[in-house]
Image (cartoon, rainbow, N blue to C red):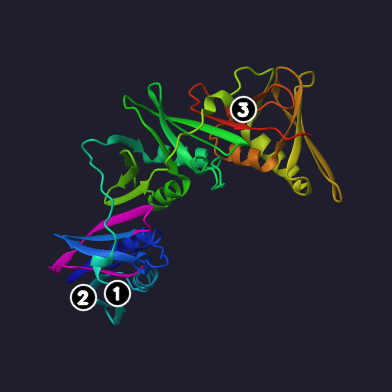
Amino acid sequence: MEFSVTQENLARALNNVGRVASARAGLAVLGNVLIRTDGTRLLVAATNLEIASTHYIGAKVTAPGSITIPAKLVAEFVSSLPKGTVDISVKGTRMTIASGPYTSVINGVDAEEFPELPSIDEQSAIHYSLSVADFKQAVAQTSITASNDTTRPVLTGVYWHSDGDTLSLAATDGYRLSERQLVKTESSVAAIIPTSSLHEVVRTLSDSDDEIDVLFDETQVRFRVNDAEITSRLIDGNYPDYKQLIPTTAETKVVIKTADLLRTTKIAALFARSSGGSITLSANADTQKLAIHSIASELGENTSEVDVEVTVSGQVTLNSRYLIEALGVIDAEQVSFSFNGKLSPVIIRSTAQNSNYFHIIMPLKS
């Protein structure tokens, strides 16, 4: 095999796919990247058997072929080279990389030992084309409420499903819940995508990307942006009926500037570290103010007041970190949070008419 590529393109491809490479006992080849010529292009790929990442780049191919080489070593070496043309040749399982005065020989493994890359029948797959900006925001808004508890695998992913005529994303860890409506759809889908796979897709995206294609089959999902693809296994199982957790009524409703609530919550959180992040929010309908109180048993206590719109006075105790994370992913000047007494879930959403996201936090027992 012999070909030439630009340092910038090769470095970007190796860095993108290399994050997926992960050697396992008995399968050391998974710590390698696959490099294979494909006409006038070069395929760079890696897999850990749960997720596969591929990237095509243009190349001047003199002699076709394929090889796998250690992912971390080749990525770091190519990233260190100066910009310009990189000439690569392979004899047996030894790859020679040359760029100007720099030459390196890396020992690889025969490509025959690399696992077969996953395939999807694109004719029968359910297909969505999404705005990259909407995709990134939706992943950020829902993945924060996914669980880390591997004993309940279905909760460690984000649930992509058709809800009426809308494609919605949802996630819950039992303490909080989020749902984001994404696009209108005529297709029917119900798939749980591992949160780690979604984060890998986001890391692969660049600022110049406008659109991302998402394809589902029965067991896999594929994300495609330009010449890069990430294919992930879906989590097997049925997602719980989270709709029954959504409050249908709210006695106390508070409307507040997002920046004001975020600032006062962060201040209160400083005094809540020794109490598991516990802060108490007290809404007063007579004064139209919200007081946020926290206590650090040894250090002192804090109370902050903010001007708000309140329907009925009420009080609730929340985990400050959960509230800060929720506010951090809501892109709105004002938010509302509503609840029914101290022990009812708190639902947070933008006050904008076209709001397509809500976030629920279960209260703490005060």
Quarter of the image that includes the N terminus:
bottom left
- On the image, the x and y values in percent for residue 362 come to 66, 32
Which quadrant of the structure image shows residue 135?
top left
Circle 2: is it few (<14), some (14-19), or many (20+) Cα within 10 Å? many
- On the image, the x and y values in percent for residue 102 come to 30, 81
Q: Earlier in the sequence, mark 3 or mark 2?
A: 2
Q: CA distance from mark 1 to mark 2?
A: 9 Å
Q: Amino acid at mark 3?
A: Ile
Q: Amino acid at mark 2?
A: Val
Q: CA distance from mark 3 to mark 1?
A: 54 Å
Mark sitting on residue 108: 1
Mark sitting on residue 221: none
Under tag 3, what secondary structure? strand
Quarter of the image that includes the C terminus:
top right
Q: Nearer the viewer, residue 264 or 364?
A: 364
Label 3: which residue? 347
Cβ–Cβ below 8 Å for labels 3 and 2? Answer: no
Under tag 1, what secondary structure? loop
Q: Nearer the viewer, residue 144 or 327?
A: 144
Q: Is residue 309 left or right of residue 197?
A: right
Magenta residues span 47-71
Q: CA distance from mark 3 to mark 2?
A: 59 Å
Which quadrant of the structure image shows residue 304?
top right
Q: Main secondary structure of the magenta part?
A: strand
When the figure is inspected, residue 143 is found, relative to residue 75, above or below; the finding is: above
Mark sitting on residue 90: 2
* Residue 57 belongs to magenta span: yes
* Residue 54 belongs to magenta span: yes
- On the image, the x and y values in percent for residue 114 come to 28, 64
Q: Is residue 250 left or right of residue 9?
A: right
